[in-house]
Image (cartoon, helix red, strand yellow):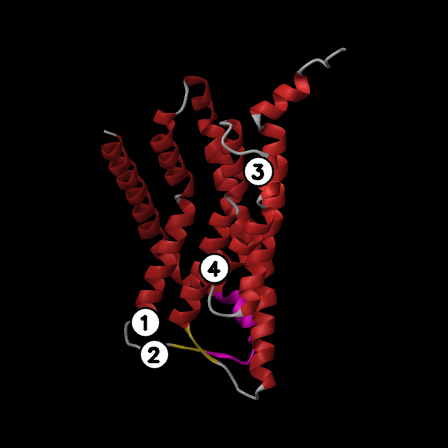
Amino acid sequence: AHLVELRGCLARAVIAIVVCAVLSFIWAGELFHFLGAPLQEHFKNAELIGTGPAEAFIVKLKVSLGAGVLIASPIWFYQLWCFIAPGMYQNEKKYAIPFVFASTACFLIGISFCFFVIFPFAFEFFNAEFSSIGVSPQIRIGEYLSFAIRLLLVFGLVFELPVLSFFLARLGLLSHRWLIDNGRYAIVIVFVMAAILTPPDVVTQVFLALPLVILYIICIGIAYVFHPKQKKEEGSPPTTT
């Protein structure tokens, strides 16, 4: 029955994304220019090229799909909640609206951080590397768009770690002591994940790894504040001898 519910949640999430993507296709050109602004700002002499007759149309489809995922994020976060809610106690189901709001907010913050902070640093570095070898860059629009959307989504999902930590801590499945004790392993895993999730260059890997480390520290604080055992210990009266 739970697998059937999963199928229903996935279907509703996909329908929401498709509907939002279809509507976004109307402004696909404007969205592409917006996504390309950081690149054109730092690659001022670069020429954006297409290498196939259908590449412009495929790019517009990709832009629309990415916009659909972004716009429909509250819906598919809610569907995620609907899937995990049956396994919770009745008093824990009241977190539905806070979960959707916090998840959507963190997702948007992660995407905004990538677009307004990571992209300028990364593109400035990449442009300098072209200049260092005396090459004028010609950038495929499809390749750039895949790079941009992938990195935006990765940062959006990575910034969900505080929300995940909050709920795991509230359920008593995660404590700040466990996070601190395993911090050294977490840092290694963070850099391995950054190497896997980002394109094969050191700069974007470091740019992803550093926010992950900061988020890990934030998760330690969240687990410390919201773990039920910790709150019980703080609220218990002192023992007397």
Residue 169 horizontal/vertical position (percent): 53, 31
Circles 1 and 3: CB atoms closer than 8 Å: no
Q: Which residue is mark 3?
A: 178
Q: In the rendered structure, which segment of residues is drawn in magenta?
A: 36-47
Q: Which residue is mark 4?
A: 151
Q: Which residue is mark 1?
A: 55
Q: Marks 2 and 3, how far apart in space?
A: 51 Å
Determine which of the numbered discs, if any, sits on residue 51 in the image.
Answer: 2
Q: Which one is earlier in the sequence, the residue at label 1 or at label 4?
A: 1
Residue 26 seen in the figure: no
Q: Residue at x 47, y 59 (%)?
A: 151
Determine which of the numbered discs, if any, sits on residue 216 in the image.
Answer: none
Residue 184 horizontal/vertical position (percent): 59, 50
Please count the marks in the image. 4
Q: Which one is earlier in the sequence, the residue at label 4 or at label 2?
A: 2
Residue 119 horizontal/vertical position (percent): 56, 63
